[in-house]
Image: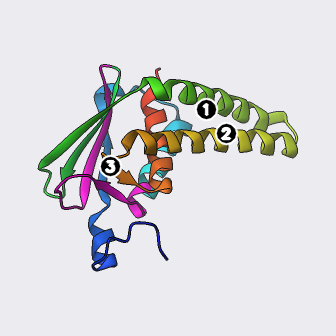
Amino acid sequence: MNDGHDCGGDKSTETADQRLIDIVLDERTMVRRSADVEQERTIAIFDLLEQNFFAPTGDFTGPYRLKLGIAENRLQFVISNAQEAHLRTIELSLMPFRRIVRDYFSVCETYFEAIKVASPAKIEAIDMGRRGLHNDGSELLRERLAEKIDIDFETARRLFTLICVLHIRG
């Protein structure tokens, strides 16, 4: 299977090195969340660690550890190597993400209300909209990280879920 990251050499070794082996969310930026949100966070981290493609630009050797947080209205990616030596910190403005995150939360609220009372067709339509916004956020993340970190779409989806978790305020 060609995932678009073939740069020659031993593909299995290259892919094994270009991945995350640990991810933590900066506890300073997090608030106590509902059980549903905690479940989404846990699943996103588990799925991310099971399969991902993460390749920071520069002369770095993976695998990598990532601390994801928000500081001074900026999204921070603190990247370390497997031995926990700091490699690079990347900061992105949160402004481009605000609308998508806000719209995503709004559709999620509608979805959770709908599953209590709405028809299956209505629930499916809302869920399609929810997934579409999630995809939009994932693509925006990939665009904003371009030339800083190369990630595949599924990695971007799971990271976008974690970015949404970081946005939740009590």
Determine whether label 2 and label 1 are within 8 Å by CB.
yes
Q: Quadrant of residue 76?
A: top left
Asked which secondary structure carries label 3, the reply is strand
Q: How far apart, in angstroms, are the residues tagged by discs 2 and 1?
A: 6 Å
How far from the left and from the top, in percent, is residue 28? 29, 27
Mark 3, residue position: 149
How far from the left and from the top, in percent, is residue 24? 31, 44
Residue that appears at 80% across and 42% down: 125
The answer to which of marks 2 and 1 sits earlier in the sequence is 1
How far from the left and from the top, in percent, is residue 102? 57, 25
Residue that appears at 84% across and 34% down: 117
- Mark 3, Cα crowd under 10 Å, few <14 / some 14-19 / many 20+, is some
The answer to if 122 sits in the magenta stretch is no
The answer to if 64 sits in the magenta stretch is yes
The span picked out in magenta is 48-72
What's the mark number on residue 104? 1
Residue that appears at 48% across and 41% down: 160
Asked which secondary structure carries label 1, the reply is helix
Relative side of 92 to 156, left or right: left
Residue furthest bottom as drawn: 10
The answer to which of marks 1 and 3 sits earlier in the sequence is 1
What's the mark number on residue 87? none
Q: How far apart, in angstroms, are the residues tagged by discs 3 and 2?
A: 26 Å
Tag 3: residue type? Ile
- Mark 2, Cα crowd under 10 Å, few <14 / some 14-19 / many 20+, is many
Relative side of 118 to 17, left or right: right
Mark 2, residue position: 130
Tag 2: residue type? Arg
Tag 1: residue type? Tyr
Q: Quadrant of residue 74?
A: top left
The answer to which of marks 3 and 2 sits earlier in the sequence is 2
